[in-house]
Amino acid sequence: MTTVTEPQPEPHHDLRASRSWRDLSVRFAVGLAFADASIVVLALPQIVGQLDTTISHVTWVIMAYNLALIAGVLAFLPLAHRLSSRRALLTGIGLFGLASIGCGVAQSLEVLVAMRCVQGLGGALLLCSSLPLLAGAARGGRATSEWAAAAAIGAAVGPAAGGLLTQAFDWRAIFIAHAPAAAIAAAAVVAVPVRSFRAVVDEPGEPSVVTPVAANAALLLLSAGLIGALFLSVVLLIDVWQVEPAGAAVIVSAIPLATVLTQRLARGRSPLLTGALGAALLAAGLAGLALVPHRELGWMVVALALCGAGLGFSFTTLTASAMGGRGSATVRAGRTVAARDAGLVVGLLVLTPLFVHDLDAAPKQALPKVASTLFAAKVDTGTKLALGARMLAIYQKTPGGQLPDLDPAFAATKQGASPQTRAALGPLQTSIEGEIQRVVTHSFRRSLFFSAAFALLVLPVLAMVWITEQRRRRPDGDAAPET
């Protein structure tokens, strides 16, 4: 039996249109909150430079939001039955928007991380209160599927949106743009004259073969693996291959495009099938990223599209299964949000040390290749020795995790050189920088294979569900005899 507070009839004849507008605004807010977990990744290299920090430290810009969101969910759930979902949603949107402005004006990494924590608390209120509002207007499983689809698309579209804003303006524009977006969502919710809904406290969600515990475990592992596609691939594109943020955003947009296409195909299908297929596709895409030989943008697009397809197939149906248990819609949504964000945190905690260690070591590992390329060049020995000494000095001054900027070494060597030598130094610089990029690209392999392993761990989880289901369906004649 449900304890939903029914809305009073709206006085206008366009009741359905107003509810649709309200539901659209709620789904937009859900997508915004999930996108914020990943929207900043294309701006991280710029933040590193402007706030004078490192890649390992700047990951806290992502981690702080997700940790605060998890903590906010856990704090909010015991109070959920006492609060109006509509008021909680508006409070969450307001807190989220104000904290976004604080992030946009932050002058240090510490302030930025603190504001991201406040953003996470606002996101927790927003996400936990959004499903009951959708459920109040949409009976059956439609509300859950809409919430799950908005969550999947929001998570996928974040990096591309962040990259375009960073290229067009600055990394701060990512956060400043959150404020009007949040204001529009809040205004849309306020404008529709619908009384707020209370959470559903007793009604179970849609039944599913995949139990909520198994579905949340699978979502955690998938989110941990997704760090490879949403974070490591971006660092590879911008920091190593020197792609501009807008260009990287176009490449990374393969993820949301594939997600949108495949999540429609997944609707109404078995979560066991779509979850396993999605995990396999995500793992294949991450393995493809790990095996990219050099600056192959087409290869990157295909691999990211596989990751997006995996996200579309698995996240929507597994999220619906995760919210299929008993308890209020708010509690069920909160558990799922916590599982997904915990996966992102686990992925960052496990992969960041591996990635930073391998990236720090990669430029020095390229030195033998650089030396052989230099001494095979068609320039005189004196030029080779002078250029080699200058490059070595730059290597020694370059911070760990960054590619050496060899332009000053070549520019100084070209001064006073003969026209023939200057003509040979241009292709030589391209060749040497290509060797460095190739070695650094390979340094991402271990972390990306670990990301793929997270995705593959979903398969044994779902296999256990399938085995349990087969045993449950076993005919009485095949069952073990009673003692």
Image: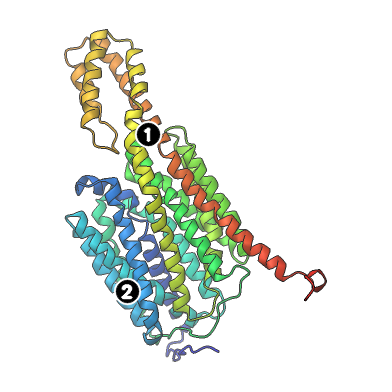
Q: Please, which residue is most extreme toward the top here?
A: 380
Residue 475 occupies quadrant: bottom right
Relative side of 135 to 165, left or right? right
Residue 416 occupies quadrant: top left
Crowd tier of the residue under label 2, counting other residues whose Cα lies within 10 Å: few below 14, some 14–19, many 20 or above: many
State the scheme by which the image is colored.
rainbow
Relative side of 16 to 361, left or right? right
Residue at x 30%, y 14% (from the top left corner): 424
> Do the residues bearing badges 2 and 1 touch, measured as CB atoms within 8 Å?
no
For marks 2 and 1, give the CA distance: 42 Å
- The quadrant of the picture occupied by the C terminus is bottom right
Query: In the figure, 295 relative to 315: above or below?
Result: above
On the question of residue 161 being in view, the answer is yes
| Res. 189 mark | none
Relative side of 109 to 154, left or right? left
Residue at x 39%, y 30% (from the top left corner): 439
Query: In the figure, 237 relative to 320: above or below?
Result: above
Query: In the figure, 264 relative to 71: above or below?
Result: above
Q: Position of residue 89 (x, y in %)?
A: 35, 77
The kind of secondary structure element at disc 2 is helix
Q: Position of residue 21 (x, y in %)?
A: 42, 75
On the question of residue 16 being in view, the answer is no
Q: Please, which residue is most extreme toward the right here?
A: 477
Crowd tier of the residue under label 1, counting other residues whose Cα lies within 10 Å: few below 14, some 14–19, many 20 or above: many
Relative side of 483 to 224, left or right? right
Front tag of 2 and 1: 1
Q: Position of residue 133 (x, y in %)?
A: 44, 79
| Res. 92 mark | 2
| Res. 440 mark | 1
